[in-house]
Amino acid sequence: MAMDMTYFDAMEAKIPHGKIRTRFAPSPTGYMHVGNLRTALYTWLIARNGGGTFILRIEDTDQGRLVEGATDVIYRTMAECGLNHDEGPDVGGPVAPYIQSERRDTYGKYARLLVEKGFAYYCFCEKTESEEDAGDFNRAADPCRSLTPEEAQARVDAGEPYVIRQRIPESGTTTFHDAIFGDITVENATLDDQVLLKRDGLPTYNFANVIDDHLMGITHVVRGSEYLSSAPKYDLLYQSFGWEVPTYVHCSPVMRDQHNKMSKRHGDPSYEDLKAQGYLTEAILNYVALLGWSPRGDQAEREVFSLNELAEVFDIGGISKSPAIFDIEKLTHFNALYLRAMTPEAFHAVAEPCIRQAVKNPALDTRAIAALLQARCEKLTEIPEKVAFFEALPAYERDLFTNKKSKTNDEVSRRMLESVIPAMEELTDWTQEAIHDCLIDLAAKLEVKNATLMWPVRIAAAGQAVTPGGAVEICQILGREECLWRLGIGLEMLKA
């Protein structure tokens, strides 16, 4: 008996039309790796550039791989990155639900519709998922493929376990078009009769994608080039239903080097890892956008883009066929550019938690410390080590007082500190300007270069050769009492 088409007609009637609709459809199986973030970003950019709709869909059909809390990671990452979705599980929309496990009944109906059309069949063979994944299935040898509809239905009605498989044509070719790779033709004989509906009633990843993308009106599908081999079967499914095929955008992989793809298993960083390593979200997004895409026309030489600027200039034609290599040094370069471009207030906001990891004394001004760091910092995680000397004078050796460029040695440094300490003790205002004028005037009085005086002051105040900021800034931030105490410690060392 033919299936009642009322349900299917109603589903078709709900599909939005008339503008670009893209979707990011992650599986909640862990953190957002760089390749996933790039897919989300490109998908969002295509929608925003074309004035379209961006959809978040959660693909949880593979129940065995789900990780608790991973869906929250997806929401948090998307929100932090500014990749706002117009439709999704949390905001709803015209084609809800947006979680695949909540659409379970839908897939079964469409799988059975394909059986009725002759483009799929019930398979009762005992076959493990590992065998399926290994590609060992021999279509010609499957006795279920040749069962009559009546024979197959009788076994279904008897309660025999089954899967539903796609019936691939035994001969001929299938050609599909990809926006990046062009037309690709494959021999149908090389395609297996993939499972569409598993024994537990849940769809396979490939089948659920096709059904959901059609029913949600998706016009552009962005995914990794590893799915190119699945595309012919996707196309055959669309043809079997009589549906319009969306624009495929297959992106080449993000590599860790010339030979290896990035992989969490091999310790390659996720978005969360990069954040923890001190990279700004804006810098990560900017860099990830350029992993396999480049602007064209008058923007061709440009590298730095805000998210809104990317949305204005992004076009699919700029996506490369070649794999992109993730270069952490290049990301660090981008991060430094973004840190330097921030307003002092914005930089202080992101730097303060890192400063306070090392500087616990509430009397020390984190804004003044941040001002020293902004031009001298590539990653936020560098900050605690750079500023720890403000909290406590580190142990150091007297040979730090010797510096050829500043023309100092132990004797010169001792004489400088012997003059500096009483001069600074007389200061009534402990400001940068007052300290600066005091030290510059003293250098002139002693007839030495400024550096000859400043070097021993900075070494005594900081206890290390490399510091953010110079002697004047460091002394002012430390405060009168701490600064003079440290200078005294340095003088005593030089006298010993």
Image (cartoon, grey):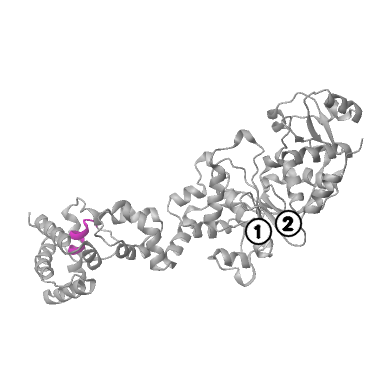
Q: Position of residue 66 (x, y in %)?
A: 59, 37
Instruction: Judge whether residue 81 is colored magenta.
Output: no
Amino acid type assigned to the residue bearing label 2 in the image: Ala
Residue numbers of the magenta segment: 456-464
Camera-side residue of 249 and 328: 249
Q: Which residue is mark 1?
A: 319
Instruction: Judge whether residue 461 is colored magenta.
Output: yes
6 displayed left or right of 84: right
Q: Which residue is mark 2?
A: 179
Which label is found at residue 177? none
Q: Position of residue 317 (x, y in %)?
A: 69, 62
Camera-side residue of 73 and 404: 73
Q: Which numbered disc flags the more N-terminal residue, 2 or 1?
A: 2
Give the secondary structure at mark 2.
loop
Residue farthest toward the left in the current orientation of the protein: 496
For residue 370, above or below residue 245: below
Give the secondary structure at mark 1.
loop
Give the residue drawn at x 24%, y 64%. Answer: 477
Mark 2 vs mark 1, CA separation in Å = 9 Å
Camera-side residue of 266 and 165: 165
Q: Quadrant of the C terminus?
A: bottom left
Residue 387: image quadrant is: bottom left
Dots 2, 1 in contact, CB < 8 A:
yes
Camera-side residue of 154 and 412: 154
34 displayed left or right of 484: right
Q: Quadrant of the N terminus?
A: top right
Per the picture, the main secondary structure of the magenta-coloured stretch is helix
Q: Position of residue 101 (x, y in %)?
A: 67, 40
Dot 1, crowdedness within 10 Å: few (<14), some or many (≥20)?
many
